[in-house]
Amino acid sequence: MAHDPQSRFEQNQQLDPRIDSPGREGLTGTARGDVYEPTRDPEDVTVGPDHRPLEEQPRWRRDFATDWPEDNFVARRDFAKFLVLISGAFVAGQGWIAANSLLRRRRPAPSRQKIGSLSALPLGSATMFAYPNAHDPCLLIRTRDGKLLAYDQKCTHLSCAVVPKLDEGILHCPCHEGVFDLATGRNIAGPPPRPLPIIELEVVGDDIYAIGVTERTV
């Protein structure tokens, strides 16, 4: 072994080949290979009643974690699922509205249909009929001055049946207290967002015919 300072310095600079080993076996004062890897506080780690590792626990226990790191992960994951579901529902809703609007435009005009007669409808009275289909309830009204009015009976809020109150001059929806003007069918109170659709009428002699439907937004 060299005794001069320069030789001793050069020997000390030589690296032990074990320094490249991940375990640093036998080397004093050296750090292990995973020293900079993230670690978790033992108090923050979920331990099940059976003391099995978290990855071996049942799915329900992993979804309802009891430690904060896992709980935060579950919360973020569920929030992401919620956003995806809401976005999908929004897109599906917009598609349904667009498809329904397209189908309505392509729907053929309602046919002419007899719905009643003047002799069977006294002044100041109302009766029901179906138009343009058997499942579309409507109201035929004859005011005290002899004017004929006809509207779709389904409230424009949630499709409850409206009830005519001729003495008060209104059509009333009992479900959510919606009110429509009897003379025009326009929404004047409550939650209904738009007027009732008008059923177009034609009178031939004593017969009353429905000849079309006019839907309105204002």
Image (spheres, helix red, strand yellow):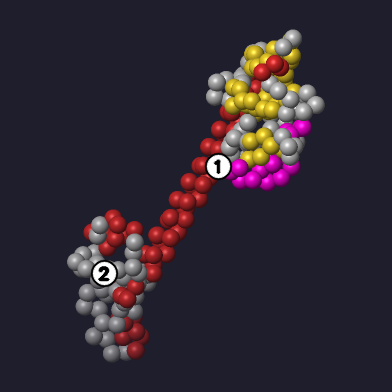
Q: Residue at x 69, y 33 (%)?
A: 196
In x, y percent, where is residue 156? 64, 37
Residue drawn at x 75%, y 28% is 143
Residue 181 position in % (x across, y down)? 74, 37
- Amino acid identity at mark 2: Val
Disc nearest the viewer among 1 and 2: 1
Label 1 sits on a secondary structure element that is helix
Q: Is residue 32 left or right of residue 113?
A: left
Q: Residue at x 51, y 42 (%)?
A: 88
SS at badge 2: loop
Indicate which disc residue 90 carries: 1
Q: Is residue 204 above or below residue 183?
A: above
Q: Which residue is mark 2?
A: 47
- Amino acid found under the numbered disc labelled 1: Phe
Q: Is residue 57 left or right of residue 35?
A: left
Q: Which residues are magenta?
A: 174-191
User: Which quadrant of the structure image shows residue 56?
Assistant: bottom left
Q: Position of residue 131 (x, y in %)?
A: 61, 21
Q: How far apart are the two marked residues, 1 and 2, measured between alpha carbons?
A: 40 Å
Q: Is residue 58 above or below residue 90?
A: below
Q: Residues within 10 Å of mark 1 (few under 14, many from 20)?
A: few
Q: Earlier in the sequence, mark 1 or mark 2?
A: 2
